[in-house]
């Protein structure tokens, strides 16, 4: 593994992977398939891999999450993530999984493990998908999920990695709080309807305005509860170009991040330095 010295973004070269799943309501099946997809990513040279939101379970109803939620730092899904990172020698970003909240709900937590299996970060989804879509589809995540309250960026051998989950993608201020981060992750279970309309456009915008690599791993297919997710998992460079993309179904997309290219984007078009938050807020 190439490990550039901290601060040497231009020396950064890392093979990235996003894993797309169509998770079912059986945890053991989902983990077995996720394990094979991670092996596929590792065989493609991936050093940093992102799983989708709800990788371990897309239940028949939202409450199913509560039956499998774990205490922080203790439980089979967390152990599985640590073991996969270690087994395959990867930085593994574990999409989202339910961790118990004090009020009986859970947090949708994104956990990051390094190649020794040590946990390096936890981010809890901050914006909850309580929406009514045209056509009658409706979601109330806040009934089962408690909102997180802190942005989290983690230091990796390739620079800072800003964490977010799915609906967070619609709140650019969160990503601006990571300004300067080289890598942004968006594990998701975007609806088919909103994904067709907004997914790529929002992802490319976050990459362009923050001049960062964006990794977006989505759920992509028909789930047992009748819910359809969009797919279209992708890796985008700081110029907004889609380097790798999946359609529907399960799979792995791979692409290389290049620190020299990122630095060139930032020095040729120094929009991050031109920002004037004093006049319109941080
Ligand atoms: N499912 C989500 O959390 C978000 C989504 O589908 C959207 O923002 O659209």
Image: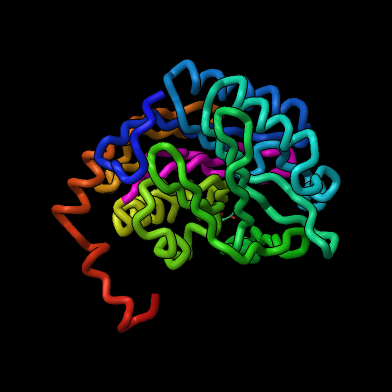
**Labels in figure, total:** 0
- Residue lying furthest top: 43
What is the quadrant of residue 247 in the picture? top left
Location of the C terminus (image quadrant): bottom left
**Picture quarter with ligand 1:** bottom right
Going 43% across and 19% down the picture, which residue do you hit?
44
Q: Is residue 73 left or right of residue 236?
A: right
Comparing 22 with 213, the one in front is 213
Comparing 135 with 184, the one in front is 184
- Residue lying furthest front: 5
Q: From where the camera sits, is residue 228 visible?
A: no
Comparing 143 with 133, the one in front is 143
The chief SS type of the magenta part is loop
Check the image and report above or below for 178 versus 223. Answer: below
What is the quadrant of residue 244 in the picture? top left
Q: Is residue 103 left or right of residue 242?
A: right
* Residue 177 rendering spot, x and y as whole percentages: 43, 64
* Residue 190 rendering spot, x and y as whole percentages: 55, 49
Going 71% across and 41% down the picture, which residue do you hit?
58
Q: Is residue 170 magenta?
A: no
* Residue 211 rendering spot, x and y as whole percentages: 29, 52
Magenta residues (range):
212-235
Location of the N terminus (image quadrant): top left
Going 27% across and 76% down the picture, which residue do you hit?
276
Q: How are the colours assigned in the image?
A: rainbow
Q: From where the camera sits, is residue 104 visible?
A: yes
Check the image and report above or below for 220 versus 207. Answer: above
Check the image and report above or below for 32 versus 160. Answer: above
Going 33% across and 57% down the picture, which residue do you hit?
210
Comparing 154 with 136, the one in front is 154
* Residue 192 rendering spot, x and y as whole percentages: 54, 47
């Amino acid at each position: 593994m190439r490990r550039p010295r901290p601060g040497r973004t231009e020396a950064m070269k890392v093979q990235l992977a996003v894993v797309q799943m169509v998770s079912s309501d059986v945890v053991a099946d989902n983990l077995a398939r996720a394990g094979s997809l991670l092996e596929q990513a590792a065989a493609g040279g991936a050093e940093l891999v992102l799983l989708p939101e709800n990788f371990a379970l897309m239940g028949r109803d939202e409450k199913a999450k509560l039956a499998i939620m774990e205490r922080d730092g203790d439980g089979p899904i967390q152990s599985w993530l640590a073991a996969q990172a270690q087994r395959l020698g990867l930085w593994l970003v574990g999409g989202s999984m339910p961790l118990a909240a004090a009020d009986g709900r859970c947090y949708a937590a994104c956990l990051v493990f390094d190649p020794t299996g040590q946990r390096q970060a936890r981010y809890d989804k901050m914006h909850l998908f309580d929406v009514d879509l045209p056509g009658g589809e409706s979601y109330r995540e806040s009934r089962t999920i408690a909102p997180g309250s802190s942005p989290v960026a983690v230091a990796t051998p390739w620079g800072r990695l800003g964490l977010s989950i799915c609906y967070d993608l619609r709140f650019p201020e969160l990503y601006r709080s990571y300004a300067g981060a080289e890598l942004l992750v968006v594990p998701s279970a975007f609806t088919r309807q909103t994904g067709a309309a907004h997914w790529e456009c929002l992802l490319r915008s976050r990459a362009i305005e923050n001049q960062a690599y964006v990794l977006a791993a989505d759920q992509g297919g028909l789930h047992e509860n009748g819910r359809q997710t969009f797919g279209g998992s992708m890796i985008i460079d700081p110029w907004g170009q889609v380097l790798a993309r999946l359609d529907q179904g399960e799979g792995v997309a791979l692409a290389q991040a290049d620190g020299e290219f990122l630095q060139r984007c930032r020095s040729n078009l120094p929009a991050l330095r031109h920002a004037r938050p004093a006049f319109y807020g941080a």
